[in-house]
Image: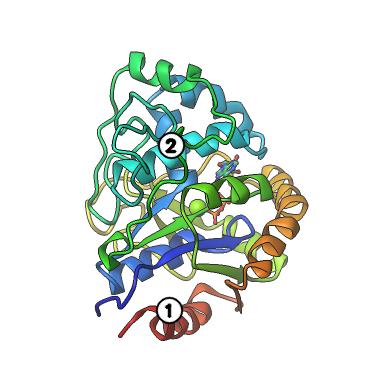
Amino acid sequence: MRLRRAARVILIGAPGVGKGTQSERLLRRFPQLSAISSGDLLRHNVKHRTPLGIKVESTIKAGGLVPDDLMLRLISNELHQRGWIFPAHPEGHVMTLASSGICAAETDSSGNGGNPSSDVETAAFLSSPTHAHGINAFGPPRVNEDPSASFLLDGFPRTATQADRLDEIVPINWAVWLKTPLEVIMERINGRWVHEPSGRVYNTTFNPPRVPGRDDVTGEPLVRRADDNEEVYRKRWERFLETSEPLLEHYARKGVLWEVEGMSSDEITPKLMREFERKFIE
Ligand code: ATP
Ligand code: MG
C-alpha cells in the first residue's frame, strides 16, 4: 500500500509494551516506511564499544535514561543520514556532525544498513559543542514532504525536552500511545528474546521464533537483553511514569496524539493499521 503523504510517526509507550513489534509490523506492511529505534541504536553502540556506547552502557544497564543532549545528536544525525531532514541552508550542518553513520544499526528491517565508522569520528561526535538550539545555525531544516521520506521513531522522544528539540528539526504528524497493563508487560519481559543486529523481537510464549533460539530471517542466535530483568524493569517503568506525562501532553497539545489499548501486540496491531491507513494511505 502506498502512502498519500509523508508519515512522521513516533511510538510512545512503557518499556516492553511492544513498540519494536508494532514498528516491525508497520514496516512490513508499508514498505515506504522505515524506522529508527533509539534503544537499538544505543545497544549497537554498546556492543561495538564506541565511545558513545561505553559512555551510556551503565545508564542503560541500570534502567536509567541517556542524557537528552546525547540522544538528540544521535537521532538527528540518523535522520539526516537517511535524508529525512535537510539543513535549511545547503552549507548548514545538522548538529555539526562530521561523522557518518556512526550510530546506525548494522542492518535494520528497512534494509538501510549503517556503517559504523572510526573512533576518531565518534569522538568528534561526542565532543562537538551543542548548539544553543541543538540543531543548526541556519534556521530550521526543510522537511522532506515526499511520502518516501516517511519514518517511524521507536523510543524517541522520551522526554518533553527531547520532544521540544525534535520539533525544531522535524514536525511529527502522528504520536501513537501504546497502552498495556503493567502486569501483562511484566510477564512478557521474561519471555523476550531479541536478534541484536536487526532488532527483531520474539517472545517464547506468544511470538516464538520458528527454530528455538534462532532468528527467523538469518538463523543467527537470539539473546536476552541485559536490562530485561525484573529489578531493572521496575526502574525503567518508574522512569517512564516520570517522563511520559509531559511527553504525552506535548503531543496532545499539538493535536496529533492517538491512544490505542490492548492486552497484547496482536490486539493492538489491527487497530493501529486501520488508523494508519485512514491517516496516510490514499
Ligand atoms: P521496549 O521494551 O518497548 O523496546 P524500552 O523503552 O525499555 O522498550 P528501549 O527503547 O530499547 O527499551 O531502550 C532501552 C534503554 O535505552 C532505555 O532504558 C534507556 O536507558 C535508553 N534509551 C532509549 N531511548 C532513549 C531516549 N529517547 N532517551 C533516553 N534514553 C533512552
Ligand atoms: Mg524498543
Up/down of 198 relative to 148, above or below: above
**Looking at this view, is 103 or 127 the one in front?**
127
Amino acid type of disc 1? Answer: Phe
Amino acid type of disc 2? Answer: Phe
The numbered disc on residue 276 is 1
Q: Label 2, on which residue?
A: 138
Q: Nearer the viewer, mark 1 or mark 2?
A: 2
Up/down of 2 relative to 6, above or below: below
The quadrant where residue 121 appears: top left
Q: Give SS at disc 2.
A: loop
Q: Quadrant of the N terminus?
A: bottom left
- Residue 188 located left or right of residue 122: right
The quadrant where residue 95 appears: top left
Q: Residue 99: x and y, percent?
A: 33, 25
**Looking at this view, is 80 or 194 the one in front?**
80
Q: Residue 97: x and y, percent?
A: 38, 27
Mark 2, Cα crowd under 10 Å, few <14 / some 14-19 / many 20+, is some
The quadrant where residue 183 appears: bottom right
